[in-house]
């Protein structure tokens, strides 16, 4: 069982930046693809970023491309989501996930196996 602990959420003004972190409890971190999802009330959870277990593939949703960056640090069992130029529409609960994925034509199909507890990101206008 992999436990994922997120941190870094909070309140920020539009145009500001936040960095979310997600640390895994297991050294098997390197065997999982990692993803970041977000969810707003009444909407389905959507994937916004993913990175393969080797770090060789990365995906960013069109809504965040050019503003967000996903990376992972194996020595710390941690995946990061750097969020710049934040907009009010980025307000959501952000979740990290560990699982498997398939990559094709720049897109990703992510199958989450474990979830973090979620962290709130609020962007004020």
Image: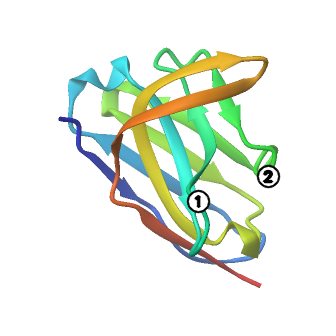
Q: Above or below — where is 51 with respect to 55?
A: below
In whole angstroms, how far apart are the C-alphas of marks 2 and 1? 15 Å
User: Which residue is identified by label 1?
Assistant: 44
User: Which residue is identified by label 2?
Assistant: 63
* Residue 85 spot, x, y in % from top left: 77, 62
* Residue 87 spot, x, y in % from top left: 77, 70
Which mark, residue 14?
Answer: none
Q: Label 2 crowding class (10 Å Cα cut-off): few <14, some 14-19, many 20+?
A: few
Residue 8 found in image quarter = bottom left
> Image point 43% across, 65% down: which residue?
119
How is the model colour-coded? rainbow
Kind of element beneath mark 1: loop
Q: Quadrant of the N terminus?
A: top left
> Image point 23% across, 36% down: which residue?
2
> Image point 36% across, 20% down: which residue?
30
Q: Nearer the viewer, residue 16 or 49?
A: 49
Residue furthest bottom in the image: 125
Kind of element beneath mark 2: loop
Q: Nearer the viewer, residue 43 or 10?
A: 43
Instruction: Judge left or right: residue 41 versus residue 118.
Output: right
* Residue 116 spot, x, y in % from top left: 35, 52
Q: Above or below — where is 26 with respect to 49?
A: above
Instruction: Judge left or right: residue 43 versus residue 97.
Output: right
Residue furthest left in the image: 1
> Image point 58% across, 34% down: which residue?
50
Q: Quadrant of the C terminus?
A: bottom right
Q: Nearer the viewer, mark 2 or mark 1?
A: 1
* Residue 25 spot, x, y in % from top left: 21, 38
Q: Label 1 crowding class (10 Å Cα cut-off): few <14, some 14-19, many 20+?
A: few
Question: Is tag 2's residue or tag 1's residue first in the polypeptide sequence?
Answer: 1
């Amino acid at each position: 069982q992999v436990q994922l602990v997120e941190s870094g959420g909070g309140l920020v003004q539009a145009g500001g930046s936040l960095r979310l972190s997600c640390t895994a409890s297991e050294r098997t971190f390197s065997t999982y693809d990692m993803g970041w999802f977000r969810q707003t009330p009444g909407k389905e959870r959507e994937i916004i970023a993913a990175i393969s277990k080797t770090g060789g593939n990365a995906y960013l949703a069109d809504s965040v491309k050019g503003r967000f960056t996903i990376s992972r640090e194996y020595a710390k069992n941690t995946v990061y989501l750097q969020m710049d130029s934040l907009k009010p529409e980025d307000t959501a609960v952000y979740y990290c996930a560990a699982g498997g994925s398939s990559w094709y034509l720049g897109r990703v199909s992510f199958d989450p196996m474990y979830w973090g507890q979620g962290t709130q990101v609020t962007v004020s206008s």
